Image (cartoon, grey):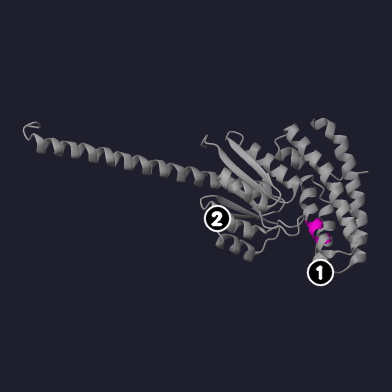
Amino acid sequence: MENVCDLNYLTEMMDNKKPLIGGIMDSFLQQIPEELQSINDAITKTDYTIIKSFAHTMKSSVSIMGIAILTPILKEMEDLGKAASGIERIKELSIQLNLICEQAIKEIETEKPNYA
Amino acid sequence: MSKKLTTIFIVDDNRIFRLALKADIEVAFAKKPIKTHLFETGENCMQEIKKEKPQLVILDYNLNSLVPNAADGIKILDQIKRECPETHVIMLTSEDHIDIALKSFHHGASDYVVKTDTKFSKINYSVFNLFKIIETTDEAQTYKYLSIALSLCIGLLVGGILALQLINPSILK
């Protein structure tokens, strides 16, 4: 399976300073499961405001890790949240979101020891 | 670039973004002494602002994604300008709306950066420009004090000579 994370952007931005990259990876591994949990809970409750807020926040988080594939998915979720409609479409998108995030977490966990 | 310590506050409700921006600025301005403080909300930032008096605040426009009752960036910008009018503020936003940009400048922001894919380079560019402005302002202040001191010295010298002339007119002949 092809990697979903492209760490080139982060590596270049941090001038390949491994402890800095490692610190951001730690933050990602901690924050993304929390954000996913919040967005999944909001979908269960059909809370469009929370869906919009977390989709917006996640867009910024995933772009730093170069997970470009998630940008259009999160953008659509944010737009639907803003419009307060389309919960069925949001559910479909969240399946993709969860799968891609799961893979991204695995990739970062594998890469993490190289940035200790 | 000046070796004087610069204090920067980063206020953004996304932890990953805060950390990445802090690291990015420290890498980009590695030769400049910088102290960076990170805040999740504007309210937390305001608790520290009087104590630290930062030269620069990088402030997100949307600060209530995770804390629904948190004050937005414009409200915090107003408070910063009230408490520390000399602090420069770079406003960040995810949405490229001219009205947000105008509102930010109207409320006293020094610059406005849209969070696109090139956001970090744009922020660095803006930080670089503001560092230059801060340095120029500091230099102008130094020259102002120097010229005041010099004028005082000249005044005292002339006064002294006149006084001597009055006391003993033959002394300077």
Residue under the point 60% across and 44% down: B8
Residue flagged by tag 1: what amino acid is it? Ala
Q: Nearer the viewer, residue B160 or B143?
A: B160
Tell me if I can see residue B83 in this picture: yes
Q: Is residue B142 magenta?
A: no
From what the image shows, is residue A17 above or below residue B38? Answer: above
Which region of the structure is painted magenta? A51-56
SS type, badge 2 = helix
Q: Chain of mark 1?
A: A
Quarter the C terminus of chain A occupies: top right
Q: Which residue is mark 2?
A: B81
Tell me if I can see residue B110 in this picture: no
Could you say where residue B146 lies in the image, as x and y percent from the top left?
Answer: 35, 39
Could you say where residue B5 lies in the image, as x and y percent from the top left?
Answer: 55, 37
Q: Is residue A37 left or right of residue B145?
A: right
SS type, badge 1 = helix
